[in-house]
Structures are given as C-alpha cells and as structure tokens.
Amino acid sequence: IGWKPPPPEGWVQIQTDGSILSPSGSAAAGGLIRDCLGRCLVAFAGNLGTCSITAAELKGAVVGLQMAWDRGHRKVQLKLDSATAVAIIKTAQMMSTYMVSLRSMLSIF
C-alpha cells in the first residue's frame, strides 16, 4: 500500500494489511492511521488465530475503522492491498462476521 496521494486536508487515511503464517494458518492484521501530512496518528497490530487471508484483511479494516471512529475521525479513506477484500466490500459478496462488522462501521462514516 503506497502513501501517495495523501488524503485531503481534514481527512485521515487508514492503511491495513492481513497476513497468514504458513503452514499453520495463524493470521494477523495491522495497520496505521495517517493525517494529510503523512504523520502516523496511531498504529495497530494483533493476532487473529486461524482464519483465511481475506478474513484477516477484513478484520484489519474493521479494527482500523473502529480506531478512527473512537478517535473522533469522521472523514476517512480506507486503503487495502487485497483486491478480493475490496471486491467483497464493494459488492457484499460474503456476509461473514467480519463483513457484518465492516458494513456496520462503514455505515456510520
């Protein structure tokens, strides 16, 4: 995920990523929230147990959106490097627990 272009003034950008450790399937997600000047406002990471890479990507997005909301940010850009996760978000292809949480978070922005 690149940092160009930065978000407009008054906005923040959430960049998240998920990962899977093979062959165990142990997953993690993390990310950061930056302002329009590129300053890191908050960084986060956590273990997710065993899940798919797409679920890890979606969980990272949920955590990032929740952290932005909790810090009072209402104008956000969400950047993911997973084309599959982006397609799921845009088309509601899958209604997993993570997707329900993500749709709920997106509806309040």
Image (cartoon, rainbow, N blue to C red):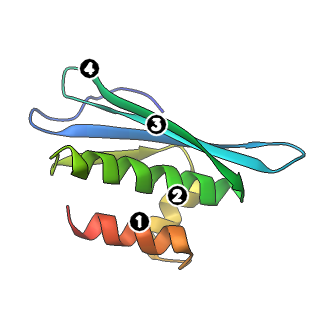
User: Which residue is depicted at the point 85% across and 43% down?
Assistant: 22
Separation (CA) of disc 4 from disc 2:
24 Å
Q: How busy is the neighbourhood of tag 1: few (under 14 within 10 Å), some, or many (20 plus)?
A: many
Q: How busy is the neighbourhood of tag 3: few (under 14 within 10 Å), some, or many (20 plus)?
A: many
Q: Earlier in the sequence, mark 2 or mark 1?
A: 2
To which residue does mark 4 refer?
A: 39
81 is higher (above) or lower (below) than 54: above
To which residue does mark 1 refer?
A: 102
User: Which residue is depicted at the point 19% across and 20% down?
Assistant: 37
Question: Image check: 74 left or right of 95?
Answer: left
To which residue does mark 2 refer?
A: 58
Separation (CA) of disc 1 from disc 4:
25 Å
Q: Which mark is residue 31?
A: 3
Question: Image check: 108 left or right of 55?
Answer: left
Circles 1 and 3 in contact, beta carbons < 8 Å: no
100 is higher (above) or lower (below) than 56: below
